[in-house]
Each structure stands twice: as C-alpha cells, then as structure tokens.
Image (cartoon, rainbow, N blue to C red):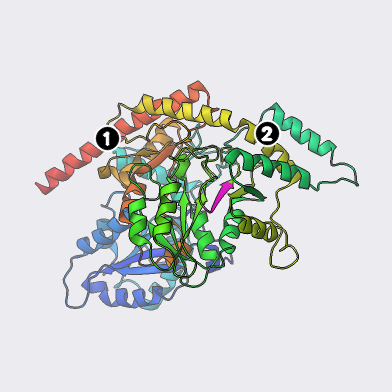
Amino acid sequence: MTPLHRLPGAGPDALPTLRLAIGADRAGQEYKDALAEHLRKQPLVASVLDVGVHLRSEGAYPQIAEEAARRVAEATLDRALLICHTGLGMAVAANKVSGVRAVTAHDSLSVRASVLSNNAQVLAFGAGIIGLALAKQLAEEWLTWRFDPTASAARKVQMIHDLERTGRVIPRPPSDRTRRVPMPTNRSTVPRTTAALSIPFEPAQGGWYTGAEHDAIRMVVSGSESWRTGWRGAEYVTSFEDAFAQYTGASHALAFNSGGTAMEMVLRALELKPGDEVISCALNFVGPHIAVIGQGGRLVLAEPDPITLNLDLADTEQRIGPQTRVILVTHWNGASADIGRLVELAVRHPHPVHGPPVVIVDAARACGGRTPSGARVGSEGWATVFSFESKKLMTTFGQGGMVTTDDHVLAERLRGLRTYGGRAGWGTNQLLTKAQAAVGLIQLARLEEMNAARVTRAHDRTAALADIPELTLPPTLDEGLHLYYRHNLLVPEAWAGRGRDELMDVLADRYGVGSIVSDPVTYLGHDLIRAHTAGQHCPRAERLAARLLCPCLHPQMTEDEEAQVLDAVRRATADVAQLQSATATATAKENG
C-alpha cells in the first residue's frame, strides 16, 4: 500500500492510482457489477479486475475472497472490494490469506480507520446492510485514504504482522516520530517499518569527501567573492570536462546539472518521432524509461540476463525491429554490460531511414568501471550518461551529470541544449556550477581509490555469505567489470515476493539492518510507465525482481557495522527458512 494519506482538499492528482479486485457471491452480485462500473470511472483507479461471481457461474464466497486477497498479497493488485449479504464472511475468508488485512465497514469513519489505523487492503460491504448509493460513496472515499508508515498506527500494524508471522505479539515501543527516515520514490522497495534500523536501507552518500575536496571548496569560495569574478565557472567546468574525457577515453565530455537532464537531452537530440522504438531492460531505475516517454519514444521492454541482470543480448535481438532507433542499456548496479556486442547487434539491424540504432548507455552506477572488452565505461556506444547524485560512486555536491561521446555533432547539439540553444535553437540552463566542477575534479582523481575500497568490501561480503544455501550472491568480478553500487542477493524462487519481503522485514525488525529492492520492474512500480507499456510483460524480469534484495553496503562502514550486516543476513535467512519450512509442512497437512 502506498505511503500516502489523504490531506484536506487533496485532489486525485496528489495520489497514485490503484489496481483493484472486486468480487461477490450471489447475494452481492448486483452490487458488485454496479460498483465495478462505477470504480472504473474514478480517476484514482488504474484498473478493476472482476474475480466473480459472474452471471450463470457458481462460486462460494470463500473462493471469491481467497482469489482477490491472494492477488493483493502477491502485489499484482493493490486492494480488493468484496460484497456478500453482510460483508462478514468475505472479510473472514480474506483474512486467512497471509499478509492480508480485511475489514467490513459501512460508514465513513470505519472506512477511514480501516486504512489509516489498520492498513487494511481489503474492504467488504454487506448488500443487505447498506444501499447501493452509500456503497458507491464509501468506495470513493476508500480510494482517497492511504496508509502512512511513519504514523503512530504503523507500530500497531507491525504488531499484527508479528502475530501472523510468529503466533505472538512482539511489544514495540512507540517510535520517535521526529526521526524520519528518507524514503525512496517507491516505498514498496524497503522494509515495512524502519524505526528499528541502525543500518539504513541504503547509503545516503556514495563517493566521500576528504580534505582535498574541502580545500577545493574553500578556494572556489575565496575566488568568487569579488563582484568582478563571481560564481561564473566556465574554466572550472571546462577543466572537469577535459579531465573526464581523458579519463574515459572519449572525444567529448559535457557536464550537466544532473544525470536525469543529461539523459533527457541525449534523447532529445535524436528528435524521436511517434512510433520510434527504444529498447531497454525492464529491470531498471525508472529514470531512463521516463526520459524515453518524455521525449516521445515508444519504450520496448526487454528481459535481463539471469546472471548479471543487465540487458539480455538474445532477448534484445528478438525485440529489435524496423522501428528501433535506440538500444538503451544500463550498467545495472555497477555490473558492466557488453556494449561492444550491443553495438554489433545494432549494426546488423539498421533502421530503414536512420541506419543502425544508436546505443545509449546509462552509467549512473558504474563510473570508473570497464566493459568486457577492457574499454573504460564511457568510451563505447553513441553516448554514455553519468550521474553524480549523492549516492553515486563520485558526487558533486549531491547532483550533477556528464555525457561522453565520440560524435562531434551530438556534442555540439548538447552544448546548445544546456545553454538556451546557443544562438539558433531551443535550450535551457542545465549547467554544472563552479563549485561542483571543482570538487568533481578531486572526486575524479580519487575515483579509483574509492571504487577499489568498494570492490574489496563487496568481495569480502560475498565470501562471508557464500555458505548460505538459500542465497544467490553477485558474481565476483575484478578488473572493473563490477563496481558493486549495490550488493545484490537473490532468495530462492519459492520465496519470491512474500518470502523476500519477509526476509527484509526480519532484517529490519529483529536485527536493525536495512535493505532495498534495487530495482523493481519499472512498469510494476510507476503509473506512467505501466500505462505507456500496457500489454508488455517481461516474466523473467518479474521473477528476478521478486527475489531481489540489496542489504546496505558502503566502503566506509566500520568493521563492526559490516559484521552486524553479515550476522543479520545469516540469522534472518535462517529465521525465514524455518518459517517457510513450517508453512510448507502445515500446507501439506491441510491438503493431505
């Protein structure tokens, strides 16, 4: 459930849309059909799945309730609305599905409390209790309420979760509501509660600053105090660009105020027309996909490689066609993709007007790496986009970006786009600042040192966890082929979804260690991408994402902090394995 709650006067645009299931037995069928039609017209509803009962079909209420609740528990849908004569039977049956909280409510106060106080995903109405008009009104109100995981009710909801998981309530002290944990864009990618974390779910900083960066900042400030000089930074920015181009081996490096705007401008330079296709891996950060949509391209989703989780070459070849203009590949979580082979693939499938599709590389998480050819990341493909956001391997005051390319025409176009179009075309101000460029020069000089420390920490963690049979660990690669922006773990296929979530919750609640799903499948977590790619599905990506978690890793974590993470992963995995075994035994007995 989304971590938002309705504010007075908040309109539909303030909240994400919901994927709903609706179901009823014979007593509630007429209400169900009318409510389904009504809900499909609501701006806060993305979709409505009717799970029955249908005309001339049979279905006892426990079957209908289980079908709807299970889809909510598996996160393929967000909520469910169920109707029977009183609503009670549907709620009781839905509550038997692990992870689901179902309630019966027939007034505005109860509907509000069902979400804000209990985080209930399933609402049941009684067709024999309330009229259809009131049912429609309450359903509309229900859509506007969203659970807030930082509210005081979250502690009690977690206690309910503990009761279901362990058979007993674990007392939890009230959390300090003044201590807010920064949340990612997609709240479902982190543990349900974060109050007990002593290790965050992700580092707030990637590349770290030393005295050299502080000296550079002081020099810039002292040199910018005069009204004759000010903060104009062309010389600093040019020096940073030249150094970056030399480091990567590219002909040009162009600095931007963020990696996101840099990606937007690279795509804008292509002047994509309706129908022009951009192939990209479904397992990805949402940023590149939003950029494709924003610049008018048709996003075509492809599967990840099962080992590296980078864009799969064979699947890309299956999806490439006469409308393909771009192959957009991400060096995912620090693992370098084989850019050379993707360029070769593009050459074999030229566009009838524009020639071979261009290969655009998102290297936000792989700055300083090398590809399988031995080339430095940034020297292959038509353009490579880097990010210097706070969590990245090097950072320029929390934001910043760079594009490298050997295409002189593209480089000149990008220079215009970031500075109001030069003297001829469209553009805007997307420049890096003087202070950012100054620290960027130092960060670049220290990048090898920082990356080496990260790789060592990741390899040590992999070795320490290698004897845990339930976990699939990231490949141990040297020579810059993997920089371990994240340390990816995959749980067994049988744990996918709920079991993975259970492991993340146990890590957080019992051992104080945060983790994040980085990244989920983009079309399952972002409404715009879901709508744009309607009808596209990448089942391998969905299966891998449902098994993925990334416990916090950073080179500057102390030895004690790293030991805490290792011990927590080992213990939490054993806890969940025991629970999974007990659940499987109980299920077998019930079915026997």
Residues 210 and 118: in front is 210
Q: Position of residue 174 (x, y in %)?
A: 50, 39
Residues 26 and 10: in front is 10
| Numbered circle sitting on residue 532 | none
Q: Nearer the viewer, mark 1 or mark 2?
A: 2
Direction from residue 163 to residue 225 in the image, left or right = right
First in sequence: mark 1 or mark 2?
2
Q: Which residue is denoted by mark 2 in the rendering?
A: 442
Q: Is residue 384 magenta?
A: yes
Please state the extent of the stretch shown in magenta in the rendering: 382-386
Mark 2: which secondary structure? helix
Point 39% across, 31% down: residue: 476
Residues 56 and 351: in front is 351
Q: Which residue is denoted by mark 1 in the rendering?
A: 577
Direction from residue 258 to residue 91 in the image, left or right = left
**Which image quadrant is residue 240 in?**
top right
Amino acid type at circle 1 is Ala
Q: As displayed, is residue 65 above or below residue 500?
A: below
Q: Position of residue 572 (x, y in %)?
A: 35, 32
